Image (cartoon, helix red, strand yellow):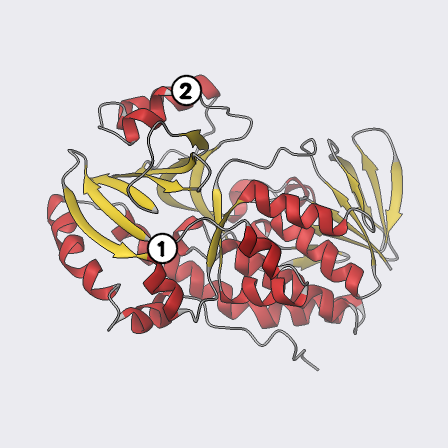
Amino acid sequence: MRVLIAGGGPAGLTLAACLRDRGIEATVMEKNEKGRTGGYSIGLHVNGWSVAERLGLIEAFRAKAMPLGPAHQLDRTGRKLFSYDYRTLAKAANGRMLAIMRSDFQHIMTQEIERDVDIRYRTTLESVIDDGNGVDVTFSDGRSDRFDLVIGADGYRSHLRAMTFGPFERFLRPLGYRASAWRVQIEKPLEASFVGMMDVDHQGGLYNVGDGTAATLFCWRDKDTGRLGPKERLNVLMERFGDWPDPIHSALRLPIDWDQAFFDTISQIEVPHWSKGRVALLGDAAWCLTFLAGQGTSTAMAGAYILASELARKPFGEAFSAYENRLRPLVTRMQAVSRQIGGHYVPQSKRGMRIQSWVLPILLSRPLIRMTSARLGAPALDLDTWSG
């Protein structure tokens, strides 16, 4: 069996590794050049952790993990609203939680598979023709090839999904926010693992990477879903956050490499069925939990592991159905959690900010953190029991 994976992000690379381990030939196609991965952080939680263990990569990820410690939330004047501790969250997850820069994750995964998997960088799809017996594809460099299956792991704005399932807007569920994230040098060390600032309709903060840099994350209410160019992006950020004090001020006055930064609307993807003929979708291309759930990478990794397991044991049609049946309940749950969290993450009023300042430290405290995690976190999947 030959499988083409469109997209060389966490979902696509994990699927390539899982297929390789099951003796299935995979080719990865990535539109960006090697090394261009995005300068923001991602989380690895229970299901992603379990997949990393099965791939023998958990120690490599742990070696590059960002430091876990106190987190401080301030108002836009710099006055502290509340604090919590990521180590308490990690303890509630029995230590199976870490944060890592996406670039480090990509580097580790690429090193793991590049000797065995053909990775074609700076390549996109020009055509995809499923004739029932296979899939003929034409690449942007003029080459053509034939595969048994094609898997779309090319993200929220999936090109493959648009080519085979329908236009982007058909599957879009906007949540009413925009977000931006990138990596930035910091002039003085942060006082915590995370320092965030919030105001009505706005949230911004910096995560300590541990090497003299920080990962930024800005989010604000905005119902517009149109794409913006680099100059417009900076203008929006400065209009929204430009008069906030440090550390926000320091992050915004340094140049932003938009080739490595994230800036987009926060929307979920809802596709009625994740497969069509010999083409299937994975990760953000299929569902997009958004960063608000904190489970996007881990759920994509779990989906990759399950999909590879099912393909190794069943005809592709049955495998696609089993993959979706096993994973969709978790995706549906975490999409609902993401929508719920959004209203708290970006407060709608001063009263809402005050309530958060009282309630969140209690919910994230040691006596209640396991209850909070059970309610808002992803349950552990049974990865090694396949359907049928």
Q: Quadrant of the C terminus?
A: bottom right
Which residue, given by chain and number where applicable, does mark 1 sit on?
339
Q: Quadrant of residue 140?
A: top right
From the image, tell me which residue sits under label 2.
Answer: 232
Between residues 193 and 123, which one lies in front from this camera angle?
Answer: 193
Residue depicted at 62% across the width and 66% down the height: 53
Where residue 297 sits, quadrant-wise, is bottom right
Comparing 28 with 186, the one in front is: 186
Categorize mark 1 by other alpha carbons within 10 Å: few (<14), some (14-19), many (20+): some
Instruction: Please determine whether, in this image, residue 78 is positioned above or below residue 156.
Output: above
Q: Amino acid at mark 1?
A: Arg
Q: Position of residue 23 (x, y in %)?
A: 84, 64
Q: Is residue 299 visible?
A: yes
| Residue 322 appears left or right of 268 | right
Q: Is residue 51 above or below residue 228?
A: below
Pinpoint residue 319: horizontal percent, then vertical percent.
Answer: 73, 69
Q: Are marks 2 and 1 in contact (CB under 8 Å)?
A: no
Residue drawn at 14 percent across, 39 percent down: 79
Q: What's the residue type where badge 2 is placed? A: Glu
SS class of the residue under badge 1?
Answer: helix
Q: Position of residue 329 (x, y in %)?
A: 51, 70
Residue at 38% over, 30% down: 186
Q: Quadrant of the N terminus?
A: bottom right
Residue closest to the eye, 339 or 386: 386
